Each structure stands twice: as structure tokens, then as C-alpha cells.
């Protein structure tokens, strides 16, 4: 009798579809801060151009779940097991704001909408809408690039990011169909509040440990003396950046690309992107993947160290990359630098932006491209050791001298 009265008290006075409308509004409000970035990246990045398609698929699946999975069930309304989930995504949103990571904020926005559905429509709706959450996440910028990196890290054959995301979305939707079948047969297990607390705690602890064991590294500030067009055996000339580079770095303060050539036929490219906003900078693997390059593992050999191994140790302040496209092979190094320090990753760049928000930032990519069968690392190492290096990036000097 008491349990029955409790259920009646927890059941909201308004029906299913008004609650669905509230969930949709909550999702829209949670995603609003990231909406401009999401839509803008769909139009500028080849890797993310079809992101809207995954959002549409997630929306369609959500409607199907409500029509098929909940048609015979009357959601109990406020489900307490959803509160820990809501709190977990609030933590993610806070971390995204603190670290200035747009992807974390966008994921938190999707998660907050999903947690609202769990709370207002019941745990069964939350479980059935989980595939919608994951498929929508596939449409967020940089997710395809991250999945591609994880795929390659497993040693699997290279696959276009769109194909990889589409295959994963199909698996998720088929799994969602199985959940609907279990729901209609009354065999769908639902987690309770305590299980939700354990799940949120486990995910939070895993994320914290990942960050703790992968702290950002920093090195001394370093930049190329660009006013020296000729040094040693190298001669430089300014060239136009590729269209993909222009799109990805369209909001940057400065985009410069040079080709340096030597008498023996070696050629090295230097790309410099300067900005006051860390969001204008991307890892070169991101734009290379969007231009058709397949990122590989660096060649074996001694660490690359320009200036006699003192100014920029590869293991501390730069990232070495290799890539292949058709009959071409690429080897390069890149780093992010400011007036006070350099760092090899975006995490370090964002931390640096918190430590010194008044400093401008720059991305440096130095790469060599050769035909298949030749070593692109050889001219790259020669250039790095012979190039004139500065103690701080261009633009970091005070305007007053």
C-alpha cells in the first residue's frame, strides 16, 4: 500500500509528451554554449563535415524509442537513480570550463540532456536512449580524429574516419534495437541509485587517473628566426597555405608557410600559426588526416634535437609525426609555444593559457615530404640542427620594445 502511494506521488501530474518537451528544451540549453563551435567545425573541417548526420540519426532513434519502447509503459516520473548521472555530467561540464576544453563541454551538454530524460521519463527511457547519446557524440568535432587515433593504436588497418564512425553508429543502433526488444518483453534490467553512484564514481576516478598519469610537459620557448631567408645550405621562400589549412586556421591572427630548399634537393616546409586564442590552434595530425594523409608511427632513430640537442629535446617539448599519402611520405615535428614555455600537446597549451592568459600562442610544424622509399627524416633532422632558433616565438616581444 505504501509503495503504491509512493509511486503515485512520484508520478508527475502532466503526461509523457510534455515531459519529452522539457527534456528537449533542457538538451538545447545545455548544448547552446557549444553550438557555434559544433556547427562551425562541421563547415570547416573535412573530418567533421558529416557530423550533422549523426545528430539526425540520434534524434530519429530517440523518437523511435519513445514510440516503440515506451508506448506500453507509463514512466514513473522522477527517477532518483538519475541524480548521480546528472551530477557526473555537471562535473564534466565544470572540468571543461576549468580546462577550457570545448569537447568536454559539448559531451557534458549531451549528457545533461540524457540525464534529464532519465530523471523525467524514468530509468527505462534512460537506458533505451543511451544509444542516442553515443551516436550524437560521434557527431561532435574531433571525435572522428580521436577514434581514428585509437583505431590505429590497436594496430588495425587504416580506415576513413567517416566510415569508422558510421560503422560504430550502426553497431550502437543495432544494440539499441535489442534493448527495445528486452524492454517490450519486460526483461530490461535497470540500475538503481546506488549502482548509478558507483558508475559515476568509477568513470570519474578513471578520468582523474588518466590525467594524473599523463601530465602535460613543458620545455623552453622556441621559435624559428623567420627574418633569415638563407642560412647554411638552406634557402627559404613564402608560399600559400593549403586550402584545408586556411579553413582550419581561418580565425588565427597569422598563418605563414615557407618552403626551405637545399642545393642537394632537400625540401622542408615550415608552418607557423599565431593566435591569442588557444581554440584557433589544432594538432597537425588533425589537419593532415583531413587532407588525406594516413598518420603512422615515427621512424626508428635517435631523437630529433635542433641546436645541438640543447634547445628542443624531442622527448620533452615536441611531437614527432610521420604520415603517408599515395606515393608520398612525410616526417615532421611540431610544438606549441608562448613567450615563457613550449609544450608538445594541446593539454599543455590550455594549461599555459590559464597560467599566462596575456601571452600570444603559436603552433610550429616543420615537415619534410619525400617519395616512397626515401627517408623523410634525414632532411628533417638536418634542417632542425642547422636552422636559426630564437628564445621566444615571434610576436611575444613587448610592443614598447
Image: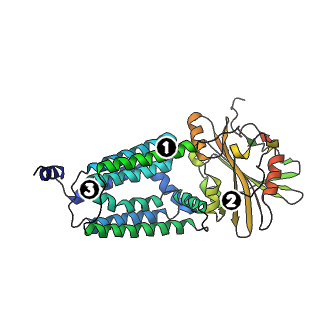
In the image, 276: left or right of 265?
A: left
Q: Residue 107 carries which label?
A: none
Local SS, label 3: loop
Q: Categorize mark 1 by other alpha carbons within 10 Å: few (<14), some (14-19), many (20+).
A: few
What's the residue at 25%, 64% (across, down)?
70
| Cα–Cα gap, marks 2 and 1 | 27 Å
* In the displayed structure image, the side of residue 397 where residue 62 appears, left or right: left
The image shows residue 279 at horizontal and vertical percentages of 56, 47
Query: Mark 2 — residue?
Result: 297
Residue under numbered circle 3: 122
Quadrant of the rendered structure where residue 312 is?
top right
Q: Earlier in the sequence, mark 2 or mark 1?
A: 1
Q: Which of 196/13 is in front?
A: 196
Q: Which residue does the image show at 53% across and 44% down from the upper left?
A: 211
Decide: is 262 above or below 163: above
Crowd rating for badge 3 (residues with CA inside 10 Å; few <14, some 14–19, many 20+): many
Residue at which label 1 appears: 208
Amino acid at each position: 500500500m505504501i509503495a503504491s502511494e509512493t509511486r503515485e506521488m512520484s508520478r508527475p501530474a502532466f503526461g509523457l509528451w510534455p515531459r519529452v518537451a522539457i527534456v528537449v528544451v533542457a538538451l538545447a540549453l545545455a548544448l547552446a554554449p557549444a553550438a557555434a563551435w559544433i556547427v562551425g567545425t562541421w563547415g570547416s573541417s573535412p573530418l567533421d563535415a558529416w557530423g550533422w548526420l549523426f545528430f539526425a540519426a540520434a534524434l530519429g532513434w530517440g523518437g523511435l524509442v519513445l514510440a516503440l519502447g515506451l508506448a506500453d509503459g507509463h514512466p514513473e516520473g522522477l527517477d532518483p537513480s538519475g541524480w548521480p548521472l546528472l551530477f557526473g555530467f555537471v562535473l564534466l561540464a565544470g572540468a571543461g570550463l576549468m580546462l577550457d576544453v570545448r569537447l568536454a563541454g559539448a559531451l557534458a551538454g549531451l549528457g545533461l540532456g540524457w540525464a534529464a530524460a532519465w530523471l523525467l521519463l524514468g530509468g527505462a527511457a534512460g537506458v533505451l536512449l543511451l544509444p542516442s547519446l553515443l551516436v550524437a557524440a560521434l557527431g561532435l568535432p574531433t571525435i572522428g580524429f580521436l577514434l581514428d587515433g585509437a583505431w590505429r593504436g590497436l594496430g588495425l588497418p587504416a580506415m576513413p574516419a567517416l566510415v569508422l564512425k558510421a560503422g560504430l553508429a550502426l553497431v550502437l543502433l543495432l544494440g539499441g534495437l535489442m534493448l527495445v526488444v528486452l524492454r517490450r518483453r519486460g526483461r530490461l534490467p535497470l540500475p538503481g541509485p546506488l549502482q548509478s553512484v558507483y558508475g559515476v564514481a568509477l568513470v570519474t576516478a578513471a578520468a582523474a587517473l588518466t590525467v594524473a598519469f599523463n601530465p602535460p610537459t613543458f620545455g623552453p620557448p622556441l621559435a624559428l628566426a623567420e627574418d633569415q631567408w638563407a642560412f647554411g645550405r638552406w634557402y627559404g621562400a613564402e608560399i600559400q597555405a593549403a586550402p584545408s589549412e586556411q579553413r582550419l586556421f581561418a580565425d588565427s591572427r597569422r598563418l605563414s608557410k615557407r618552403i626551405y630548399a637545399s642545393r642537394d634537393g632537400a625540401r622542408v616546409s615550415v608552418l607557423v600559426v599565431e593566435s591569442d586564442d588557444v581554440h584557433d590552434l589544432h594538432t597537425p595530425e588533425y589537419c593532415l588526416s583531413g587532407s588525406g594523409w594516413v598518420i603512422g608511427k615515427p621512424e626508428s632513430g635517435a631523437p630529433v634535437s635542433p641546436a645541438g640537442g640543447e634547445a628542443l629535446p624531442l622527448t620533452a617539448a615536441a611531437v614527432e609525426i610521420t604520415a603517408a599519402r599515395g606515393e608520398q611520405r612525410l616526417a615532421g615535428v611540431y610544438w606549441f609555444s608562448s613567450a615563457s614555455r613550449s609544450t608538445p600537446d594541446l593539454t599543455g597549451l590550455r594549461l599555459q593559457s590559464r597560467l599566462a592568459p596575456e601571452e600570444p600562442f603559436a603552433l610550429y610544424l616543420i615537415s619534410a615530404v619525400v617519395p616512397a622509399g626515401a627517408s623523410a627524416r634525414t632532411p628533417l633532422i638536418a634542417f632542425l640542427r642547422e636552422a636559426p632558433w630564437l628564445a621566444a616565438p615571434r610576436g611575444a616581444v613587448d610592443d614598447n620594445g
